[in-house]
Amino acid sequence: MTIGEVVLLTGASGWLASRVADALLKDPLTPNAFLIVTDIAKPRLEADNVIAVQADLTDNDQIDSLFTTAYGVPDTVYCMHGIMSRGSEDNFDLGLKVNVDSVRSLLETTRKHGNLKGKSIKFIFTSGLAVYGGPLPPIVEPDTSPTPQSAYGTSKLISELLINEYTRRGFIDGRILRLPTVIVRPGQPAAATSAFLSAIIREPLKGEVAICPIGNSFDSPQTELKTWVASSKSILQNLIIAKHIPASKFTPHTRVVCLPGFTTTVREMLEALRQVSGPEALRRVVFRDDETDRRIVRSWPEKADNSYALSLGFVKDEGGMVPVVRRFKDDVQAGLA
């Protein structure tokens, strides 16, 4: 068997990482790709060129075993596992163990096997808006200082710093992607603070009730809360694009990139739901204001500068919320969401 490019992907039982795995198998720029997919629950992806492994990434020996499968040492690692934002806030110790300690162990293992093979393995890390907090400028620029206001954001920033340092020293070829809030995610709600932003669109389009923890009604002042989002379609495209960007294109001092997004409010999202699917869909949203969720979301950026990311070749959404909701409705009706 001739092995082509090998990609290791962690967190592969999660919705986003599983979609990245599917996209890698179809990527025309990665012909003959071979995937090693892993998570605490064995990923369900099945294909001739996929090895699915159940692994606890807080165990160093289990991490090492991912680099010694029949496919050999990966050429690229997608680090996408973790305890999500509200989960990290509620269980601080577990969040540190998974979101910091296991990432460092994965970095060390990537460094070790890269050295043995005489190559710098690409290491693509999904970070997010939670690294920001406190008083922020109207537009987050590439040099805006991250000051996280949550356990999740703090752990992501620690991992970012490690990846930058490992890259500076030539141990790995890091690419750190700060994702906007991804909408609309299919499947079951995650333990992320931002999960409601998908739920208030997804559940009503499926004929189900959704809880909105921001405000007590559609017209509540709190629903004017702004957030920085991107469609699942553009996020998936950009996660694949990240693998193909030459290392020389990144700025010398950091591998952090804020992926392109757009600004919306909770009310605009709900209004898009009403425009696409009518007032009956909107009536399925139940408001239960949650101060903790509101505090965390309010600490995130409202807008970021897209210019650096676009100069690297990443793509952005056009047209705001309505096309995003309409596309997801089409997926629901087609049984794809």
Image (cartoon, grey):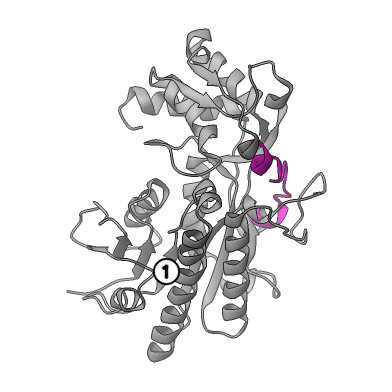
Residue name at image x 32 percent, y 26 percent? 334
Q: Residue furthest top?
A: 279
Residue 157 occupies which quadrant of the picture? bottom right
Q: Position of residue 33 (x, y in %)?
A: 31, 64
Q: Given the image, on which type of amino acid does mark 1 rest? A: Val
- Residue 82 appears left or right of 168: left
Question: In front here: 97 or 278?
Answer: 97
Q: Quadrant of the N terminus?
A: bottom left
Q: Residue at x 25, y 57 (%)?
A: 42
| Frontmost residue, 61 versus 179 | 61
Q: Secondary structure at mark 1?
A: strand
> On screen, 8 above or below 80?
below
* Foreground pick, 263 / 27: 263
Q: Quadrant of the C terminus?
A: top left
Q: Which residue is mark 1?
A: 77
Crowd band around label 1 with a 10 angstrom C-alpha radius: few (<14), some (14–19), many (20+): many
Q: Is residue 27 magenta?
A: no
Magenta span contains residue 301: yes
In the rendered view, tell whether residue 251 sits above or below residue 127. Answer: below
Please say if 88 is above or below 189. Answer: below
Picture coordinates of residue 272, whole percent (x, y): 58, 21
Q: Residue at x 64, y 17 (%)?
A: 218
Task: Find residue 38 and report its image quarter.
Answer: bottom left
**What residue lies at 62% left-to-right and 60% top-to-bottom?**
154
Residue 249 percent across, percent down from the top left: 63, 69
Count of marks overlaid on the render: 1
Of 152 and 30, the residue lying toward us: 152
Q: Which residues are magenta?
A: 294-309
